[in-house]
Amino acid sequence: MNTKERENAILPATDILERSEGFHIFMDMPGVAPDALSIDLEENELMVTGASRYTPASETQGRYSTPEFGAPVYRRVFTLSDMVDRERIKASLKDGVLDLFLPKAEAMKPRRIPISSGELE
Amino acid sequence: MVIDFNTVYDLPKDMDRLFAGILGSSGMAQRRITYPLINVSENDESYMVDICLPGVPAEELEITLAARSLIIKGERKAPEGRYFRQERAAGSFQRIISLNVPVARDGVTAKSENGIVRVTLPKTEEVKPRRIAIE
């Protein structure tokens, strides 16, 4: 990844939501094929990068009206909290949408603390 | 005394980025107002309409060829859950592209790849470029 690509990378539209079993991050990455996607976890930072493989027809052949979308490099960095079980993060890419599933760590699930009666030491 | 703020404030670069953001958004046609985004192109054989529709499966999408227009219609469903952030557009959409040229109606095809749908509308023989032989 050279400097130019890094500068030109755009932030993909993202939904972040919580369900009982964990968090989901949905990202719009139209034109990105599964093999052009990289997800890197370094300490607390999760970096998602994907290069669109969409080839506007004008580049290969023919003429164009005003283009409304292109083939960018998408990049977004998330900071994970300790609530996330890093070992079990799952990702799937379908129809140009990345679904990242971040399960909650077992230790972080709410736990009730039992109270025993007796004298304090 | 000289205080170097460079490590704290990256101002020139931030400003560049701000301007790039402003110019970049107006560079693309009618961003945020229109949905879905499309690219229209043509070659000698056909017209191509590329529709940017990530997350819309083929069965949720309806592409109709009317007398003089191409109608793109569908619904994009928002996933269920408690939202912390919602940036992705959701809901019903429709976009009509007028065709001012005759197309070979039976030859129209649509193909979807990684969230981008390409509709190919072949040109009719009358409008195809034709070399005229000189007698």
Image (tube, coloured by chain):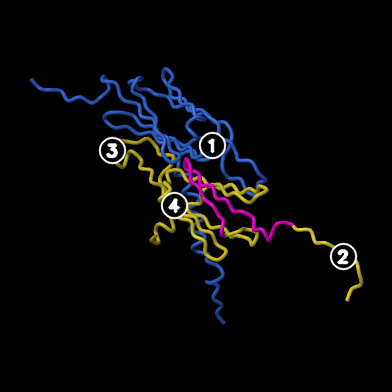
Chain colours: A yellow, B blue
Crowding at dot 3, Cα within 10 Å, few <14 / some 14-19 / many 20+, comes out as few
Q: Label 4, secondary structure: give it.
A: strand
Q: Which badge, 2 or 3, comes first in the chain's sequence?
A: 3
Chain at tag 3: A
Q: Position of residue B76 (x, y in %)?
A: 55, 35
* Residue to which mark 1 is pinned: B33
Question: Mark 4 and mark 1: span between their CA atoms?
Answer: 29 Å
Question: Quarter holding the C terminus of chain A?
Answer: bottom right
How busy is the neighbourhood of tag 1: few (under 14 within 10 Å), some, or many (20 plus)?
few
Q: Is residue A109 magenta?
A: yes
Q: Which residue is mark 2?
A: A116
Q: Position of residue B39 (x, y in %)?
A: 40, 36
Q: Are marks 2 and 4 on the same chain?
A: yes
Same subunit, labels 1 and 2: the answer reads: no
What's the CA distance linking mark 1 and mark 2? 62 Å
Q: Is residue B89 above or below residue B99?
A: below
Disc 1 sits on a residue from what chain? B
Frontmost of labels 2 and 4 is: 2
**Marks 3 and 1: same chain?**
no
Kind of residue at badge 4: Leu
In the rendering, at what x and y percent does residue B60 appear?
52, 30
Q: SS class of the residue under badge 1? A: loop
Looking at the image, which is closer to me, A26 or B129?
A: A26
User: Looking at the rendering, which quadrant does residue B9 occupy?
Assistant: bottom right
Marks 2 and 4, how far apart at CA: 52 Å
Q: Earlier in the sequence, mark 2 or mark 4?
A: 4
The residues colored magenta run A87-110
Horizontal placement of A41 versus B80: left or right? left
Query: Given contact means CB atoms under 8 Å apart, are the residues at marks 2 and 4 in contact?
Result: no
Q: Nearer the viewer, mark 1 or mark 2?
A: 2
Q: Residue at x 38, y 43 (%)?
A: A54
